[in-house]
Amino acid sequence: MRAASAAAAVAALLLPLAGCARTDAPPVLTDGPSPLATEVVLVKSGGIAGLSDTVRVEPDGHWTRTDRGGASREGQLAAEKLTRLRQLAADPRLAAEAAVTVPPTMCADAFTYRLTIGPNQVGYVDCPPETTPPAVTAQVVDLLNDATG
């Protein structure tokens, strides 16, 4: 009997506070991929021809690829590629890769990649077998090169 009256007393005390709850807060979505929070920028340079391409991907998956002469192409990442990019951008290994200092390479005419996702900036020179590219960064580079041609 005591427990029932104590519960009733607590409920009576808390009932006036129920009106203080905010109802204008946006709902928390837990299903589906997380949004890409920031622009992704990939710069590919080097090679025998002195290539310099920049790929920019907006949070909604719209991309622009600009070459060294200023010519550009645009497109939209396919849903599965955008989902994969979002997963890679949120991977904690990306921040760890950005914190690593990469020693200079003696590789001639190799491609250099510089990837920026939010505060993380990581780069590597594609010079096998001298270097092994950072795993997550290389996956993003492959995805963007494949998707934007």
Image (spheres, rainbow, N blue to C red):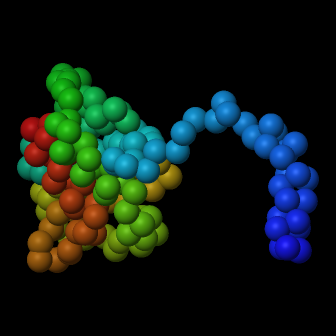
Residue at 42 percent of width and 66 percent of height: 92
Query: Which x, y percent locates residue 77?
Result: 20, 36
Name the foreground residue: 112 vs 3.
Answer: 3
Residue 100, placed above or below residue 149: below
* Image quarter (top left, top right, bottom left or bottom right) of the C terminus: top left
Q: Quadrant of residue 72?
A: top left
Residue 22, placed above or below residue 6: above
Residue 141, placed above or below residue 108: above
Name the foreground residue: 90 vs 141.
Answer: 90
Q: Is residue 149 left or right of residue 15?
A: left
Q: Is residue 72 left or right of residue 11?
A: left
Would you say residue 22 is visible in this rendering?
Answer: yes
Residue that sits furthest to the front in the current view: 1
Would you say residue 53 is visible in this rendering?
Answer: no
Query: Which x, y percent locates residue 121?
Result: 42, 55
Q: Quadrant of residue 54?
A: top left
Q: Quadrant of residue 97?
A: bottom left
Name the foreground residue: 50 vs 42.
Answer: 42
Query: Which x, y percent locates residue 35?
Result: 40, 42
Name the foreground residue: 1 vs 8.
Answer: 1
Residue at 17 percent of width and 50 percent of height: 143
Residue at 64 percent of width and 35 percent of height: 25
* Image quarter (top left, top right, bottom left or bottom right) of the N terminus: bottom right
Query: Which x, y percent locates residue 20?
Result: 81, 39
Count the marks: how many? 0
Residue at 34 percent of width and 42 percent of height: 41
